Image: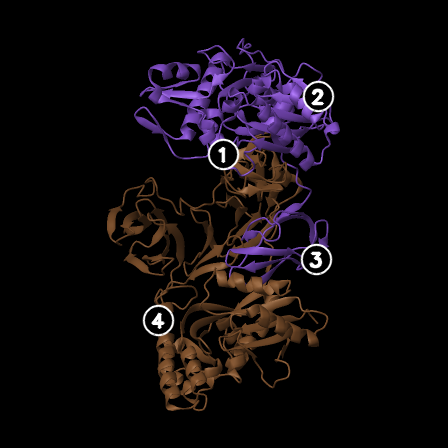
Amino acid sequence: MNPRPGGGLGSASAPPGDGAALPLPALVIDFGVHTTAAVVVRPQGAWLVPDPASGTPLWASAIHWDGERFAVGALAEHRRRSDPRGFAAGFKRDVGRDAPVQLGARRFRPFEQVFELFSALRAEAQRRCGFELHRAVVTVPTGYGPGDPRRGRLIAAAEAAGLGPVELLAEPVAAACAPTGAPPPAPGDILLVYDLGADFQTGLVHIRDEEPELLGSATVDDWGGRGLDALIAAGLLTTVLDRTVACCRDLLARVGVPARAVTAVIAVGGWSRLRTVAPSVERGLGIKVSRLEEPELAVARGAAAWLPASGSRVIAAQPSPDRAVPLAFAIPGGSARLLAWLVAPTQSYLEGAALARVRLADGAVWELVAHDRGTLDQVLVGPGSAVSAGQWLALARV
Amino acid sequence: MGQPTLVVDFGTCTTAAAVVVGDAATLVRPPATDAGVWPAAAGDPARLLGAIRAEALRAWPDGIDRLALTVPASYPVPDHRRDLMIATGEAAGFGEVELVGEPEAALLDAVPQADVADGALVLLCDLGGTWTTALLQVSGPNVLRLGHETSEVGHDLDAKLAADPDQPSGEWVARLADAGLRWAVASCRSLLARAAAGKGVGTATGAIITDVSVVILVGGWARLPSAEEIIHSGLQRPVLSTAEPELGVVRGAARWVASAAHRRVAADPPRWRVESLAWHIPGGRGRLTAWQVSDGQPYAAGASLAQIRTIDDRVFELTAVDDGALLGQPAQVGDIVGPTLVAPAKRQASCLAGDAPEKRQELWAAGEWLLTPDRRLLVECAATGRHVKVWSIPDGSLVRQFRPDHGGVQPDRGRVFVDPRGRLSLVAWDVSGSFSVWDVNSGRLNVTFRDVAGPRIVLVNEGEWRLTAEGDGAAAGRYRRSVATMWDLSTGLRVERRTDQYGLRRLPGYSDRSAVDGFGEQAFSPDGRLRAVAVRDEDGSAALALQEATNDHEVFRAEHAHSLRVRMAFTADGRFLLANWEADQRSQVEVWEL
């Protein structure tokens, strides 16, 4: 990993796909409420994609609609001055909603606004790289848990922007992988990510041999009706830090990890630049804080470092054992619910033996019996599942 | 001795229960009473079920794990009330709960007395708490329900009886019951009419009332003196009333439980040319996001066949290790899959070399064989044209048989052709030149015509649906000149007659056997991986060689001594290889499963 902030992209001579089984090349996007960072990741290295209007690696998470086309990032902010009605920012907070927002004479849903931002990131990345990008990793807050519709919205927006297939990565995991200038964490280390950005989130990350694991996370997004930015601007930083430290302590207690077991605190997010943050956190938690030079880029850089190390995305088919045959049945009525397997994997059975029991739609219970003698190799459908005629329910050796 | 099963018939007014062990059923009676039935569940079936179970366990202390509950005809499939009944049984501690339709159970109770044959139609009148009529059909050991109707007459009678218990045979009973029984008669006729019109399941299309073997009466109100009389006079069919009719459903359900051995379905025979591709999903499960290869499509080693998204939103490609062809997509895009996703694939063609295909069928005929153009059915045509048989390829069963009625004048020759609309047609003729053209499916005689020349050579153009017959014309000196006549097979009219040297024999598109026959001199499997070709053995007899299409490597050979000719084909699904061996007087078809 050799991030080069502010452009300076490498040669585009290597063809896309030279990452073999790795999911590369890909575009990493750290989509924030205020700012967004993007990194092109290839086997040869990773390069930040700067905003062409400002030249900085942080793009404003903003769009502007002038009635004909969108402007994104710094250009959108620039056009806001002359046409504020076409401007939108902070739409990450609304990504789970469908209510459209008026921009000039038209209305755009949050999904469409994210799509425009991602499209612009991809277009700029491709323009600088010279090859197309068809894979992406988007970092997401820990509050976007499994099944959260916002995950699906972000995936859909990125895929609609031509970045499919799109993966998601929890922001604390990405931050834990960010290069710090110090020796990288060793397997077994536990890192506490302290992310003080537009909101506060913390995550406890266990560095394993294969990949980092998020042991737990917590967020503070309710600041008593005022935003985090407003509180800090109002000089209430101490109050903010007290709450964040308490949140970290609660997390450690909930997960059951004592503070002394934590290797380091990784402080990320724009507000962690403040000089008083690291000492306060060290004092409050009793854990050394690793400070990063550009903490607002740590998540993007960490995700770019995580991606090549996260392993292959190819699952090769397992060769079937000799004479492995599927077990399928002409179930009366076409469908049923599997009640139980009557033989277990590796167990042998004779011709005509009852292998499983199903309940038909009308409530009758039928037995599924063996056509030939054999040995059950692998059960493909578990009890309680709906099954249909001709469906492979198990593999057997005969 | 099998495991005991508790059978419970929850009725509107009473509940009946029995325990079935093997073939024997024993009624479970309420304790400390002489009654044969329990009270109705009255809104708390779980409690009543618990009481019945406790009583049953006094006689079967080792435990009863199975429960069969009867379910009213009015509960459709699926229906949440069925799920509720199953849940009630499981909550009561039964490991396995199944449901039995009340009409089906009632019929099974009456079967020993009714002596109904397989396929017979039976009408059922269940005159219990809810009156139900049902039209049933016996199908082997099972019962098909072709239709049913319900009425609340039983409730009304029970309510009247409860309000006026001293006059059970009073005038009001007769009046209400007579009206209800007339409803039952009308309902039975209506059920039969609907089934006869071909609506619903079963094979009662065109049935009339005399096709009904028996009318069965069950339920407590079947004891009414007028019941049997009104039903019989209204339907004019034999009526069977069983003893203790309020127990008919539970007795039948017990018989149903005892016949569990019939409710078994054997695994499909294994297909040796199929192998499984198994992918273990990281994290145990994921969502299928795409299939990259469609059904039947070949793929190369390393190709991505599908794509999944794991629960932590990582995207994986599911790849093949070897070349192959996908035989099916076991899940749909969007489905949750795992921990293992298994897809069917074809084994490599070279596997055949060490694992010869199994011969499934051998069929002989004193005539000729044709494989339908869709390569799904085999057609046997007697050389005399006196019968045509259509055979199923997978199991060798006779699908259809057609013996044309030639009116006592039997033809000498016959062949099957395919008309321009794709229908199988038998063209039969005799030495005198009498031709007849038959539709094989319907058995209809389409046209006849007479060619006085006495045909020696008969050719058919299936596209134009015309026939040329060449025979001997009138003598001219020492010579007898050939005469060729063209006939329109749609109308039976003569189109053209020629007496020149070549006649009509050289016209394009005319052939002595079907040009769209699925059998050919060589054949390619639908996926293009295999080619079947005719070869000669050292003794000169015909043989069939199966080769890999890409490199001509022979993977299988079939020989047939004394055959002069072999034609071959693959079925449309590529599952079977067929060879048609022909000798002087016999023609044989062999079928191998690939």
Query: Cα distance, mark 2 to mark 3?
Result: 66 Å
Q: Are marks 4 and 3 on the same chain?
A: no
Chain in brown on the image: B
Give the SS element for disc 4: helix
The residue type indicated by label 2 comes to Lys
The residue type indicated by label 4 comes to Ala
Q: Which mark is residue A150?
A: 1
Foreground tag (4 vs 2): 2
The reply to whether residue B314 is in sight is: no
Name the quadrant of the N terminus of chain A.
top right
Chain in purple on the image: A
- Residue indicated by mark 4: B193
Give the SS element for disc 2: loop
Q: Are marks 2 and 1 on the same chain?
A: yes
> Where residue B252 appears, x then y in whole percent?
55, 75
- Residue indicated by mark 2: A288
Q: Which mark is residue A350?
A: 3
Q: Chain of mark 1?
A: A
Q: Is residue B12 above or below residue A96?
A: below
- Cβ atoms under marks 2 and 3 closer than 8 Å: no
Q: Chain of mark 4?
A: B
Q: Chain of mark 2?
A: A
Question: Could you classify mark 3 by the number of other residues whose Cα lies within 10 Å: few (under 14), some (14-19), or many (20 or more)?
Answer: some
Q: Nearer the viewer, residue B572 or B479?
A: B572
> Where residue A108 appears, x then y in whole percent?
37, 29
Q: Are marks 4 and 2 on the same chain?
A: no
> Where residue B416 appears, x then y in whole percent?
40, 53
> Where residue A158 appears, x then y in whole percent?
47, 27
Mark 2 or 1, nearer chain start: 1
